[in-house]
Amino acid sequence: MRYGSVCSGIEAASVAWEPLGFTPAWFSEIAPFPSKFLATRFPHVPNHGSLIGLADRLAGDDRRIDLLVGGTPCQSFSIAGLRGGLTDDRGNLTLQFARLAAALRPRWVLWENVPGVLSDRTNAFGCLLGALCELGYGCAWRVLDAQFFGVAQRCER
């Protein structure tokens, strides 16, 4: 399974999926430290930088992926933050994620975020679900806690 990863961070998904035979086609990360880490850990996987306008920058084989995965920034949805939702540039990346799914049309789409997105006053999650449903994707979601998956902390996603 080939996947493209946005807001990749240090790419924990790739570490988890490597034993399953999943291979990253590309990353989309702008932060300096994670970008340097990705270049070191995955030297043959291109990092296309910003999610904004990414579909226009992808060409050829990079456009053909089975899975689009990403966890857009959570600060605008977190109950610990200001909860700007879609009015915050970081929250608006949720819509950019939906646009990328529309442009690439992978078989699968996986989006991760904090539970606060479920009560976001700008309805970012509803907008994402609506966009994915209009594209013909079936949708399902769950809130999972990392403490039940071998991590020594409570971290709901």
Image: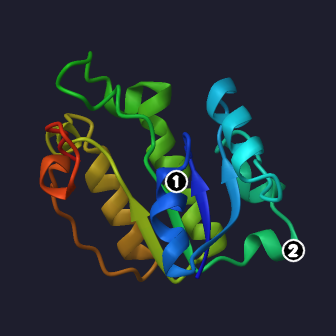
Q: Secondary structure at mark 1?
A: helix
Is 101 displayed left or right of 135 in the figure? right
Q: Which residue is mark 2?
A: 60
Q: Which residue is mark 1?
A: 97
Residue 140 % position (x, y): 23, 72
Q: Secondary structure at mark 2?
A: helix
Based on the displayed image, in which of its 4 quarters is residue 111 positioned?
Answer: bottom left
**Colour setup of the view:** rainbow
For this rendering, which residue is in front, 104 or 1? 1
Q: Residue at x 65, y 26 (%)?
A: 33
Q: Residue at x 26, y 23 (%)?
A: 83
Is 21 displayed left or right of 87 in the figure? right
Residue 70 % position (x, y): 48, 53
Find the distance from the CA under tag 2 to the CA under tag 1: 20 Å
For this rendering, which residue is in front, 53 or 32? 32
Q: Which mark is residue 7?
A: none
Q: Residue at x 82, y 76 (%)?
A: 61
Relative to 139, does residue 36 appear above or below in the rendering? above
Residue 127 % position (x, y): 34, 54
Circle 2: residue type: Gly
First-in-chain label (2 vs 1)? 2
Circle 1: residue type: Phe
Based on the displayed image, in which of its 4 quarters is residue 114 positioned?
Answer: top left
Q: Quadrant of the N terminus?
A: bottom right
Q: How many marks?
A: 2
Residue 103 % position (x, y): 65, 68
For this rendering, which residue is in front, 145 or 94? 145
Q: Residue at x 67, y 33 (%)?
A: 30
Badge 2: how crowded within 10 Å, few (<14), some, or many (20+)? few
